[in-house]
Amino acid sequence: MSAAIPIILHQLWREAELPPPYSEWRAGWIANHAGWAHRLYDDEAIRRITADRAPQWLPTFEALPRAIQRVDFFRYLIVYLDGGMYADLDMISYQPCDPLLAGASCVLGIENHISRKRQQELNYERPWQLANFIFAAAPEHPFLASLLEAIARQATTKVNSDHEVQEITGPRLLTRIAYGLPPDVRGPIRVLPQINWNPPSIYPRIGPLAGRIYARHLCLGSWRTRRHWWQQPAEGRLGHHIRPPNPFALASADLP
């Protein structure tokens, strides 16, 4: 898989009009990626595009019990169809992401470094949880195809908690697919160090760190039924299991 990643940014919202501060954050992405195509999809467009361009996936889309799961599914689907980069609207852009994508066909970022204990509990191959709030790929990348197929196999599964959303369509599923698929099935994946797309808020954007921070996720969690970390059941939160990343890490080990 050697196809280039198109310079398209995909973002999603419930309605066509963005309220502040989301509109300001999106304007920042547009300003920093002036040569890119910028596409914003609302709920109506999400269903229409799925039905028109990928009707084979419409039953999966409609079977998913929660709105956030359908949003998760569509973010993978639209990047699979058109290629480009997806970013949540609660992300702040600091500089163009072009250098991070150059020469790659699929780029993922580390959401969090986790403890060895939590790694074993989640059955992750490595002590990282990978992010689904931002990622990029060439059209029809096999990793995204595998991700869509995995969701289809459990689309009708009843969801009882927010952490189950992460297991069925969210970052836990994405992480397990990335780690678990044979390289010849999922294709090559570049994994960025956490500081590039999800630096802890305590990391200052000055001095030697500034050039390494391209964006930051604010983690507003508007989709959650329980918004605060202490309201989450133990199995649904990382909490004290998160380890601060090395801000000077040159790169994470790519998945070949």
Image: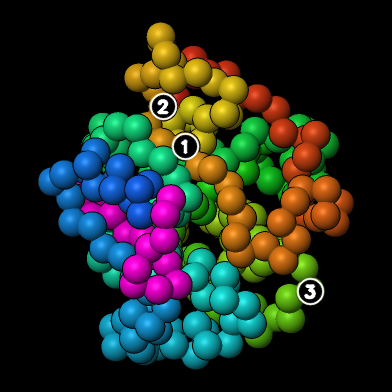
Q: Which mark is residue 213?
A: 2
What's the amino acid at mark 2? Ile
Residue occupying image coordinates x 61% and y 64%: 223
Q: Which residue is mark 1?
A: 216
Relative side of 50 to 118, left or right: left
Mark 1 or mark 3, whichever is nearer to me: 1
- From this viewpoint, which residue is outermost toward the right? 234
Relative depth, front residue between 95 and 184: 95
Q: Residues within 10 Å of mark 1 (few under 14, many from 20)?
A: many
Q: Which residue is mark 3?
A: 160
- From this viewpoint, which residue is outermost toward the front? 20
Relative side of 166 to 238, left or right: left
| Image: 104 above or below 225 | above
Task: State if disc 2 and disc 1 touch (CB < 8 Å).
Answer: yes
Residue occupying image coordinates x 28% and y 54%: 9
Relative depth, front residue between 235 and 96: 96
Q: Is residue 17 magenta?
A: yes
Q: Is residue 85 magenta?
A: no
Cα distance in 3D space between marks 3 and 2? 36 Å
Cα distance in 3D space between marks 1 and 3? 30 Å
Q: Main secondary structure of the magenta part?
A: loop
Region rendered in magenta: 1-22
Relative side of 168 to 41, left or right: right
Q: Position of residue 50 (x, y in %)?
A: 36, 82
